[in-house]
Image (cartoon, rainbow, N blue to C red):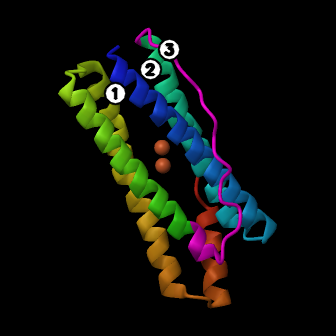
Protein backbone atom coordinates (compact mmCIF):
# COMPACT_ATOMS: atom_id res chain seq x y z
CA UNK A 1 0.00 0.00 0.00
CA UNK A 2 1.05 3.58 -0.65
CA UNK A 3 2.43 4.95 2.65
CA UNK A 4 0.31 8.15 2.72
CA UNK A 5 -2.82 6.20 1.84
CA UNK A 6 -2.15 3.63 4.56
CA UNK A 7 -1.57 6.39 7.12
CA UNK A 8 -4.83 8.12 6.12
CA UNK A 9 -6.83 4.87 6.28
CA UNK A 10 -5.47 4.26 9.78
CA UNK A 11 -6.71 7.74 10.73
CA UNK A 12 -10.11 6.80 9.29
CA UNK A 13 -10.15 3.58 11.35
CA UNK A 14 -9.67 5.76 14.42
CA UNK A 15 -12.53 8.05 13.26
CA UNK A 16 -14.90 5.11 12.86
CA UNK A 17 -14.06 3.74 16.30
CA UNK A 18 -14.38 7.27 17.73
CA UNK A 19 -17.86 7.43 16.19
CA UNK A 20 -18.61 4.02 17.75
CA UNK A 21 -17.62 5.39 21.14
CA UNK A 22 -19.43 8.72 20.69
CA UNK A 23 -22.71 7.05 19.75
CA UNK A 24 -22.30 4.75 22.74
CA UNK A 25 -21.91 7.79 25.03
CA UNK A 26 -25.06 9.29 23.48
CA UNK A 27 -26.88 6.00 24.13
CA UNK A 28 -25.71 6.08 27.75
CA UNK A 29 -27.06 9.63 28.15
CA UNK A 30 -30.46 8.72 26.66
CA UNK A 31 -30.68 5.49 28.67
CA UNK A 32 -29.89 7.40 31.85
CA UNK A 33 -32.65 9.90 31.07
CA UNK A 34 -35.05 7.02 30.25
CA UNK A 35 -35.36 8.02 26.63
CA UNK A 36 -34.98 4.33 25.88
CA UNK A 37 -36.13 4.20 22.26
CA UNK A 38 -33.49 6.74 21.26
CA UNK A 39 -30.93 4.85 23.35
CA UNK A 40 -31.72 1.70 21.40
CA UNK A 41 -31.34 3.56 18.10
CA UNK A 42 -28.00 4.99 19.20
CA UNK A 43 -26.70 1.59 20.32
CA UNK A 44 -27.55 0.19 16.86
CA UNK A 45 -25.78 3.12 15.23
CA UNK A 46 -22.80 2.61 17.51
CA UNK A 47 -22.61 -1.05 16.46
CA UNK A 48 -22.67 0.07 12.80
CA UNK A 49 -19.72 2.39 13.37
CA UNK A 50 -17.80 -0.48 14.95
CA UNK A 51 -18.50 -2.52 11.81
CA UNK A 52 -17.20 0.36 9.65
CA UNK A 53 -13.97 0.41 11.65
CA UNK A 54 -13.63 -3.36 11.30
CA UNK A 55 -14.33 -3.21 7.56
CA UNK A 56 -11.28 -0.96 7.09
CA UNK A 57 -9.29 -2.99 9.63
CA UNK A 58 -9.88 -6.15 7.58
CA UNK A 59 -9.23 -4.29 4.33
CA UNK A 60 -5.82 -3.02 5.49
CA UNK A 61 -4.85 -6.55 6.52
CA UNK A 62 -6.07 -7.95 3.20
CA UNK A 63 -3.82 -5.41 1.45
CA UNK A 64 -0.88 -6.52 3.59
CA UNK A 65 -0.73 -3.14 5.36
CA UNK A 66 -0.20 -2.57 9.09
CA UNK A 67 -3.23 -1.58 11.16
CA UNK A 68 -2.19 1.03 13.71
CA UNK A 69 -4.78 1.58 16.41
CA UNK A 70 -4.45 4.83 18.31
CA UNK A 71 -6.09 6.53 21.26
CA UNK A 72 -9.81 7.31 21.18
CA UNK A 73 -10.76 10.69 22.70
CA UNK A 74 -13.25 10.91 25.55
CA UNK A 75 -16.67 11.35 23.92
CA UNK A 76 -19.16 14.09 24.78
CA UNK A 77 -21.29 12.65 27.57
CA UNK A 78 -23.70 15.46 28.48
CA UNK A 79 -26.26 17.12 26.21
CA UNK A 80 -28.72 19.94 26.74
CA UNK A 81 -31.61 18.03 25.21
CA UNK A 82 -32.42 14.87 23.25
CA UNK A 83 -32.64 17.03 20.15
CA UNK A 84 -29.08 18.22 20.80
CA UNK A 85 -27.89 14.58 20.84
CA UNK A 86 -29.07 14.17 17.26
CA UNK A 87 -27.84 17.61 16.18
CA UNK A 88 -24.40 16.47 17.38
CA UNK A 89 -24.84 13.15 15.54
CA UNK A 90 -25.61 14.99 12.30
CA UNK A 91 -22.55 17.24 12.70
CA UNK A 92 -20.44 14.15 13.31
CA UNK A 93 -21.74 12.43 10.17
CA UNK A 94 -21.11 15.56 8.08
CA UNK A 95 -17.55 15.70 9.33
CA UNK A 96 -17.00 11.99 8.60
CA UNK A 97 -18.31 12.58 5.06
CA UNK A 98 -15.71 15.27 4.45
CA UNK A 99 -12.98 13.00 5.86
CA UNK A 100 -14.03 10.21 3.49
CA UNK A 101 -14.08 12.67 0.59
CA UNK A 102 -10.52 13.81 1.38
CA UNK A 103 -9.39 10.22 1.76
CA UNK A 104 -10.91 9.34 -1.61
CA UNK A 105 -9.16 12.32 -3.19
CA UNK A 106 -5.83 11.19 -1.72
CA UNK A 107 -6.36 7.69 -3.16
CA UNK A 108 -7.29 9.19 -6.52
CA UNK A 109 -4.11 11.32 -6.62
CA UNK A 110 -1.97 8.31 -5.72
CA UNK A 111 -3.73 5.98 -8.17
CA UNK A 112 -4.67 3.70 -5.24
CA UNK A 113 -7.36 1.91 -7.24
CA UNK A 114 -8.19 -0.91 -4.83
CA UNK A 115 -8.57 1.62 -2.00
CA UNK A 116 -10.85 3.79 -4.13
CA UNK A 117 -13.12 0.80 -4.72
CA UNK A 118 -13.20 0.03 -1.01
CA UNK A 119 -13.98 3.65 -0.17
CA UNK A 120 -16.87 3.81 -2.62
CA UNK A 121 -18.85 1.75 -0.14
CA UNK A 122 -18.15 4.40 2.51
CA UNK A 123 -19.17 7.27 0.20
CA UNK A 124 -22.52 5.58 -0.39
CA UNK A 125 -22.93 4.78 3.30
CA UNK A 126 -22.33 8.42 4.28
CA UNK A 127 -25.11 9.61 1.96
CA UNK A 128 -27.47 7.27 3.82
CA UNK A 129 -26.19 8.13 7.30
CA UNK A 130 -26.44 11.88 6.72
CA UNK A 131 -29.93 11.50 5.26
CA UNK A 132 -31.14 9.50 8.26
CA UNK A 133 -29.60 11.87 10.81
CA UNK A 134 -31.00 14.91 8.99
CA UNK A 135 -34.50 13.44 9.01
CA UNK A 136 -34.34 12.76 12.75
CA UNK A 137 -33.00 16.27 13.44
CA UNK A 138 -35.87 17.75 11.39
CA UNK A 139 -38.38 15.84 13.53
CA UNK A 140 -36.81 17.01 16.78
CA UNK A 141 -36.87 20.61 15.54
CA UNK A 142 -40.53 20.18 14.61
CA UNK A 143 -41.71 18.77 17.94
CA UNK A 144 -39.67 21.17 20.10
CA UNK A 145 -40.21 20.27 23.75
CA UNK A 146 -43.74 18.94 23.55
CA UNK A 147 -43.61 15.88 25.88
CA UNK A 148 -46.24 13.84 24.04
CA UNK A 149 -44.56 14.32 20.66
CA UNK A 150 -41.14 13.55 22.16
CA UNK A 151 -42.47 10.27 23.55
CA UNK A 152 -43.88 9.40 20.11
CA UNK A 153 -40.50 10.16 18.58
CA UNK A 154 -38.77 8.01 21.19
CA UNK A 155 -41.10 5.14 20.31
CA UNK A 156 -40.40 5.59 16.61
CA UNK A 157 -36.61 5.60 17.18
CA UNK A 158 -36.92 2.48 19.31
CA UNK A 159 -38.50 0.57 16.44
CA UNK A 160 -35.25 0.62 14.45
CA UNK A 161 -34.19 -2.89 13.52
CA UNK A 162 -30.78 -3.99 14.72
CA UNK A 163 -27.94 -3.91 12.16
FE1 LIG B 1 -18.99 5.24 9.87
FE1 LIG C 1 -21.68 7.14 10.67
Going from N to C along the chain, the mark reached first, 2 or 3, is: 2
- Is the Cβ of the residue at disc 1 closer than 8 Å to that at disc 3? no
Separation of residues labelled 2 and 3 (CA atoms): 10 Å
Residue at (50%, 36%) from the top-left corner?
A: 52
Q: Residues within 10 Å of mark 3 (few under 14, many from 20)?
A: some
Circle 1 sits in a helix, a strand or a loop, which is it? helix
Q: Position of residue 100 (x, y in %)?
A: 35, 41
Q: Is residue 137 left or right of residue 50?
A: left
- Sooner in the amino-acid sequence: mark 1 or mark 3: 3
Q: Which mark is residue 102?
A: none
Question: Magenta-highlighted stretch: main secondary structure?
Answer: loop
Q: Secondary structure at mark 2?
A: helix
Can residue 129 be seen by looking at this rendering? no
Q: Is residue 44 above or below residue 65?
A: below
Image quadrant containing the C terminus: top right
| Residue for badge 1 | 118
Report, in whole angstroms, how far the alpha carbon at label 1 lies from the one at label 3.
Answer: 17 Å
Helix, strand or loop for disc 3? loop
Residue hosting label 3: 66
First in sequence: mark 1 vs mark 2: 2
Give the Cα distance between marks 1 and 2.
8 Å
Q: Is residue 73 magenta?
A: yes
Marks 1,2: beta carbons within 8 A: yes
Q: Within 8 Å of ligand 1, the CB of disc 3?
A: no
**Residue appearing at x 64%, y 46% in the figure:** 73
What residue span does the magenta drawing correspond to? 63-85
Magenta segment: does it hold 44? no
- The disc label shown at residue 59, or none: 2
Question: From the image, which quarter does the N terminus lie in?
Answer: top left
Q: Is residue 137 visible?
A: yes
Amino acid sequence: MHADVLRAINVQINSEFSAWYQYLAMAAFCDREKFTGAARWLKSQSAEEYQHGMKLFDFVNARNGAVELTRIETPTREFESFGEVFEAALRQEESVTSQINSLYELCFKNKAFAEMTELQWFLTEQVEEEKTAREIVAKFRLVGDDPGSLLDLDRELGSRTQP
